[in-house]
Image (cartoon, grey):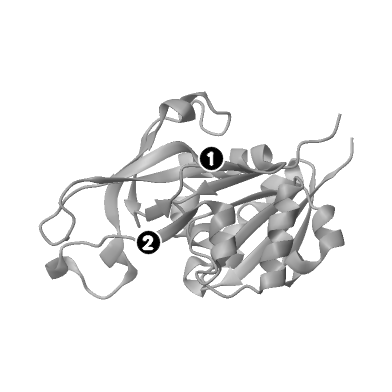
Amino acid sequence: MTQRRALVVRGGWEGHQPVEATDLFIPYLEGNGYTVRVEGSTEIYADAAEMADTDLVVQCVTMSQITSDQVAGLSAAVAAGTGLTGWHGGIVDSFRASSEYLHLVGGQFATHPGKEPCERHGGAEDNFLPHTVAITDLGREHPITTGVEDFDLVTEQYWVLHDDLIDVLATTTHPTRAWHPWQRPVTSPAIWTRVWGAGRIVVTTPGHSLDVLEHPSVRTVIERGMVWATRIASA
């Protein structure tokens, strides 16, 4: 069997620990028959030959910039069958100025609501809220999330703007609180897939820090998502 090729692209905002976070999953990929190439920038996306030989892209690049030829190269590769996956800001808060990238991924981080103002002290923990990731009916049958029960986290709870081309495997609901301006609970997708041409995309929004990535349910979803997103071999 031909060995599968994974490309790990990491960088951007250091607060999401792109090196340490992706290092958690490289052994899993290697142990499951992938050869892994690691890049510290998105320049490789513009290399059509390299992208055509890549079966899976694991991206962890929060914010940052991307050129038009790089995002066009990534989009073309996915449409041709290269898988794309990632977690948290590394995939859903990347390249905010690129509408082409947002169109590819299907959802964009908007905010993560915070604690009551009197409980904030200026650190990342100001936005760590207890919340539930609820598996949808589709998610209970999907190979990425089958057997995964609803689970609770205390971390950033992503509010995501999205379109309806995504297939939602799990959601999270933002309640109403006296210090927030919205007047009814808002449900956001927390885990989703997207089919783009011949390619598959998987987005997992939990993953702000290493302890969240090591949560058994989060890690299971990310690892299964890598396998599911990988290019489907030709018959």
Q: Which callout, 1 or 2, points to the residue nearer the camera?
A: 2
Task: Kindly give the residue lying farthest to the left in the view shown.
Answer: 178
Q: Amino acid at mark 2?
A: Ala
| Mark before the other along the chain sequence, 1 or 2 | 2
Residue 42 falls left or right of residue 156: right
Looking at the picture, how far across and down is residue 112, in whole percent? Answer: 32, 60
Q: Which residue is mark 1?
A: 221
Q: Camera-side residue: 147 or 167?
A: 167
Q: Camera-side residue: 9 or 201?
A: 201
Q: Residue at x 69, y 43 (%)?
A: 197
Q: Amino acid at mark 1?
A: Val
Q: CA distance from mark 1 to mark 2?
A: 22 Å
Secondary structure of residue under mark 1: helix
Q: Residue at x 27, y 54 (%)?
A: 129
Looking at the picture, how far across and down is residue 181, in whole percent? Answer: 16, 60
Q: Which label was assigned to residue 133? A: none
Position of 192 relative to 68 (above/below): above
Quarter residue 142 falls in: top right
Quarter holding the N terminus?
top right
Q: How many marks?
A: 2
- Evaluate whether residue 80 shows in this view: yes
Position of 120 relative to 201 (above/below): below
- Evaluate whether residue 40 shows in this view: no
The crowd level at tag 1 (other Cα within 10 Å; few <14, some 14-19, many 20+) is many
Residue 230 falls left or right of residue 160: right
Quarter holding the C terminus?
top right
Position of 92 relative to 14 (above/below): above
Q: Which residue is mark 2?
A: 110
Looking at the picture, how far across and down is residue 233, in whole percent? Answer: 81, 35
The crowd level at tag 2 (other Cα within 10 Å; few <14, some 14-19, many 20+) is few
Secondary structure of residue under mark 2: strand
Quarter residue 99 falls in: bottom right
